Image: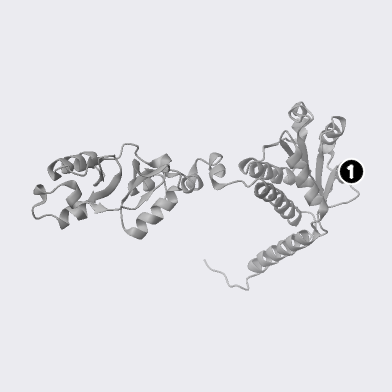
Amino acid sequence: MTSSTTDPLIETARRVVRREADALGMLACSLDGNFVAAVELILAAKGRVIVSGMGKSGHIARKIAATFASTGTPAQFVHPAEASHGDLGMVMRGDVALVLSNSGETPELADIIAHTRRFDIPLIGIASRPDSTLLRQSDVALLLPPAPEACGTGIVPTTSTTMTLALGDAIAIALMEHRKFTPEQFRVFHPGGKLGARLAKVRDLMHDDPPTVAHDTPMGEALITMSGRGYGVVGVTDTDGHLQGIITDGDLRRHLSGLMDLTAGDVMTAAPRTIHPDALAETAVRIMNDKKITCLFVTDPQSSSTAVGLLHIHDCLRAGIA
């Protein structure tokens, strides 16, 4: 079933999205030195960022903690109600607390706020009321701008939670860029799924026993090595073991007449395209697609002519890269 673009439901959806977009614009304009202070407080912490919130703010807090943890800032979500029943022991000197509450008066937050004050644990508060208990108790107060909730009645956390989530993302990315967090480091925390596959390195997928033959090897022997390994390719090396060329099925077809009277050096394609083991596997796939080839020999970064592995397009496909 399709609906007209003037359907009341679509109009409602557009109103909600526009209100939240407008609120994000207000948030961007409201950022000031307190944001910088919050980031610097986290950078100075020797422990973790303890993120906490109740209800919808708790859901946002969990996501912010996960984003921090995956981008190089150790973080943990602590449920404020559970904190009052023993989990306050998770919040220790050296940590910094990031506590979320739209009103800033959520009763369940009282114990965790008091705990940070008692043990001199830096507290960053995010709320929409400047005179709220949370922001008055905070070492750094991040005030949400007075944007109306998207529901129109002001009772459903919508705009406020969107702004809080965006603010958490802004802090995480500011920390990430300051620390120069790299895609390679990112992959350490994301080994699974499509994202992990995209960030896999060539060394993670390559075969570390590439098939090679010497330059003067008769083609009869070279064919045995080539077919026995099942990659459809064999490397050709000089007397010092340096990769000089490769032999593929295409090379065999081009030299079919009198093939068995030739050596590997006679048949090979010289100066083949190679890749280093620390390159992203996604880069290898792009090269293979551009060159219309199915294999890349992997060479030692210290000696670009020494083959240390072989990467086949099928290895990349099995890993979900392509």
Q: Amino acid at mark 1?
A: Thr
Q: Residue at x 67, y 67 (%)?
A: 14
Helix, strand or loop at label 1? It is helix
Q: Position of residue 90 (x, y in %)?
A: 73, 29
Q: Residue at x 38, y 55 (%)?
A: 287
Residue 54 is at least partly visible in this image:
no
Residue 146 is at least partly visible in this image:
yes
Q: Nearer the viewer, residue 272 or 244?
A: 244
From the viewer's perspective, is residue 294 above or below residue 85?
below
From the viewer's perspective, is residue 231 above or below residue 6?
above
Judge the density around disc 1: few (<14), some (14-19), many (≥20) Cα neighbours within 10 Å: some
Direction from residue 26 to residue 235 in the image, left or right = left
Direction from residue 136 to residue 145 in the image, left or right = left
Q: Nearer the viewer, residue 171 or 109?
A: 171
Q: Position of residue 5 (x, y in %)?
A: 60, 72
Q: How many marks?
A: 1
Direction from residue 76 to residue 93 in the image, left or right = right
Q: Position of residue 253 (x, y in %)?
A: 16, 55
Q: Residue at x 75, y 41 (%)?
A: 42
In this figure, which residue is indicated by the disc labeled 1? 133
Q: Position of residue 75 (x, y in %)?
A: 68, 38
Q: Nearer the viewer, residue 199 or 81?
A: 199
Direction from residue 289 to residue 1 in the image, left or right = right
Q: Nearer the viewer, residue 105 or 267?
A: 267
Q: How is the image coloured?
A: one colour
**Quarter location, residue 96:** top right
